[in-house]
Image (cartoon, rainbow, N blue to C red):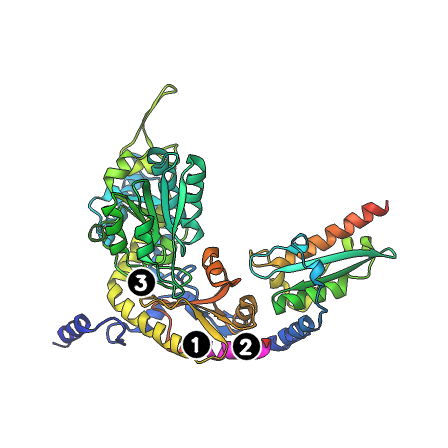
Amino acid sequence: MELFLILRFQKMTAPGATLKLSLDINKIREDFPILSREVNGKPLIYFDSASTAQKPQVVIDSLTNFYTYQNANVHRGVHTLSQEITVAYENARVTIQRHLNAAHPHEIIFTKGATESINLVAHSFGKKYIQKGDEIIISEMEHHSNILPWQQACEEKGAILKVIPMNDSGELMLDEFKKLLSPKTKIIAVTHISNTLGTINPIKEIIELAHRNNTPILIDGAQAVSHTLVDVQSLDADFYCFSGHKLFGPTGVGILYGKEKYLNEMPPYQVGGGTIKTVTFQKTEYADLPLKFEAGTPHIAGGIALAEAINYVNHLGLDNIAVYENSLLEYATIELNKIEGLRIIGNAKHKTSVISFVVEGLHPFDVGTILDQLGIAVRTGHHCTQPIMQHYGIQGTVRVSFAFYNTKDEINTFIKGLERAIKMLK
Amino acid sequence: MFDDWSDKYEYLIDLGKSLPKLDDMNKTDDKLIKGCQSKVWMHSELVDGKVIYTADSDAIITKGMVALMVRVLSNQSPDEVIDSKLDFVEKIGLTKHLSPTRSNGLLSMIKQMKLDALAYKQLKS
């Protein structure tokens, strides 16, 4: 009866409510061995999950287990180890397919990360579909990894890069976006959630607008997948990408989801072993999806551990995670706004648990250095989003980013530390 | 030498605040040593066979480190600058500021100081 009530309460509760019933944070923190570390003689307070997330024991164990008991190459062998590991790797692909609700496992391509996924699309889609005079649309709040590949594609093909502007709250201006769309728009690339501003973009609406213009769209989900469930079919995204290490999985592995109608038509990106059906010096016939885009031996351990990370997160429930993180976001925002001379950069109506701020007269690097002495890990600088910095006329920000293993107590310690840093530096 | 980290950083911050500001005339792009986050400008001159450095940074703690480097390296012959080991940095526990992360203009500045000294040495000969 109690469980039923909890579940019903969860369904009724609007996002933004404080609901800790369903997540036992102290128990969850025990799953993350690194959180018991000390840094500079102080307990680690890790507020940099937007840069890379920490790993639960099951993910660490999966990696160790692979190299201890399972290691063999995939797709290539006839012996038992290679067959077992191929099954495990392909099962991981299916786990990821189900997690994104993709229609087919072969629409899930393993890459090195979101950056490589975007480069793959820019290169391969660009090669086939983009001509001189065509247009590519991105947004002002993109991470460099979702700017540079398109900039390069434009330079190579003589295409034009257009940019959806954002307002000072850090929200994309959709009316301006509509004006940018034209018959020459060949592809659009927009971030789901901004790593610097925390803004959650209305991507369903953006995708609809793109499709009304008959333009495919890539969504950069690097920041999103740790905070929200993503249903690529419901969104009708043409491409969606993310990095494993931001989803509590290992570094060096990531995912590109693409609708098979596009992936089938796109030429291979990197070529080499595993991407072929037949090879002669005259001609090579390429493999079917997904192997066409998976040259060489992949990060097998990484793919399998990523599936473990997804299972772990689904066990907690991303809805529960979102509600909890929202409570941290609200609390930290209130506390930060009390500090004199502090300005939060990015005040969108819909945000995830990422807060960038500046303190008047202080260089973010100095603030971050003092906080580090107190064991508090934040990120400072331009966060690979120099256009955002240019928008606000600043050099950089201090950024705190929370995950479900952070606590209100940690935020309190951080606020006190920040006040101390300000006192020392002014 | 520093037991408490805050003493160490207070010292650096005070050093940084006391470093004379580099003339705007010398805060040009060609004097800029690019780190990802904190900017460092460094200017050098050869006066009576000694290399004189003046420098500045937009981040206070970096400025403190810059002041320390200038104090140690300035007003020496080019050879003395080139040969200096800078292991005092480790002794006072500030090595991490010399780590080659993208954020660090400081490491690049030290390299540039030594390069300038080398250039002056070659000019002399």
Question: In the rendered image, which quarter is residue A158 located in?
Answer: top left
Q: Residue furthest top?
A: A282
What is the chain identity of the residue bearing mark 3? Answer: A
| Front label number (3 vs 2) | 2
**Which image quarter holds the C terminus of chain A?**
bottom right
**Apparent side of residue B57 relative to residue B80 in the rendered image (left or right):** left
Query: Can you identify the residue that label 1 sits on?
Result: A336
Classify 10 Å Cα crowding around label 2: few (below 14), some (14-19), many (20 and above).
many
| Residue linked to disc 3 | A227
Residue tagged 2: A422
Q: Secondary structure at mark 3?
A: loop
Count of number-bearing discs: 3
The residue lying toward the viewer, choosing from B60 and A416, is: B60
Q: Which kind of residue does numbered mark 2 sit on?
A: Ile
**Secondary structure under badge 2?**
helix
Q: Is residue B21 above or below residue A159?
A: below
Q: Is residue A69 visible?
A: no
